[in-house]
Image: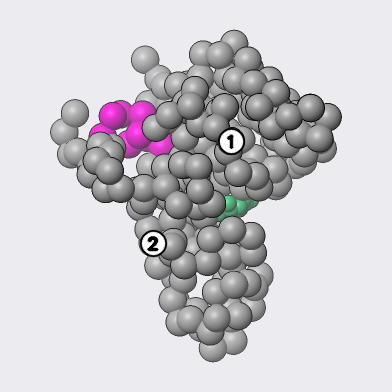
Amino acid sequence: MRKRIAVLASGSGSNFKAIMDAMNSFGVYEVVLCISDKAGSYVLQRAEEAGIAAFSFIPKSFETKAAYEQEIINHLQQWNVDYIVLAGYMRLVGSTLLEKFEGRIINIHPSLLPSFPGLDAVRQALEASVKVTGMTIHYVDAGMDTGPIIVQQPVTIDEDETEPTLTKKIQQLEHEWYPQVIAWLCEGRLIVEGRNVHFMNKV
Ligand code: GRF
């Protein structure tokens, strides 16, 4: 049985597309739901075109963050979601959602964490004049991009690098690795011990 995935996103959804494109070749996960915190974000259009249930819930139209997240949980439960994949979801996950889906939420971030967490990670790397940055896929905890790291891949920063060129290089890696990590997650190959994530070759 394929595991059922919900993608939470705020933006264009290029990772959503990569996850969808690789879904049938891995054959172990199925994207069943897409939720955005921004009405009209392009990811929702991508989901609708792919025939995936798509909703936007706007945090400020709820009285509390807990109420906002409870509405998300209602949908996750209605769609029998096993795992949550954050793909450009520009918001901290609160305790309501974290408690319900403990150990079942992952995120992708465009830097080698713990360097450059939070917003504008690509720009932060350029401004710091580092020579190497990259992308990180990690479990989500209550902090800002602080959960146990699953995979990291480096990208070399060239002399003439700009934010768009560097973003493009990082996103190529993201699109290659995120579907693979989701497949490992769904196959039960990822074992978390404290902050360490081990990979099991055989399940
Ligand atoms: C990605 O670079 C991801 O690392 C970050 O947000 C971006 C989302 O891009 N968390 P997209 O919406 O998948 O194109």
Q: Residue 77: where, in percent of width, then height? A: 56, 14
Camera-side residue of 124 and 20:
124
Q: Name the colouring of the figure.
A: one colour
User: The residue tagged with tag 2: helix, strand or loop?
Assistant: strand
Question: Which residue is disc 2 drawn over?
Answer: 153
Q: Position of residue 68 (x, y in %)?
A: 70, 27
Magenta stretch: includes residue 187: yes
Q: Is residue 187 left or right of residue 22?
A: left
Quarter of the image for residue 8 reads top right
Tell me if residue 109 comes above or below residue 182 in the rendering.
below
Amino acid found under the numbered disc labelled 1: Gly
Q: Residue at x 54, y 52 (%)?
A: 144
Label 1: which residue? 94
Q: How crowded is mark 1: few (under 14 residues within 10 Å), some or many (20 or more)?
A: some
Residue 3: mark = none
Q: Quadrant of residue 26?
A: top left
Q: How many labels does the image show?
A: 2
Residue occupying the point 45% across, 82% down: 131
- Mark nearest the camera among 2 and 1 is 1
Magenta residue span: 182-189
Q: Which amino acid does label 2 sit on?
A: Gln
Residue 108 position in % (x across, y down): 50, 49
| CB of mark 2 near ligand 1 (< 8 Å) | no
| Residue displayed at 38% across by 61% down | 153
Image side of residue 163 versus residue 130, left or right: right
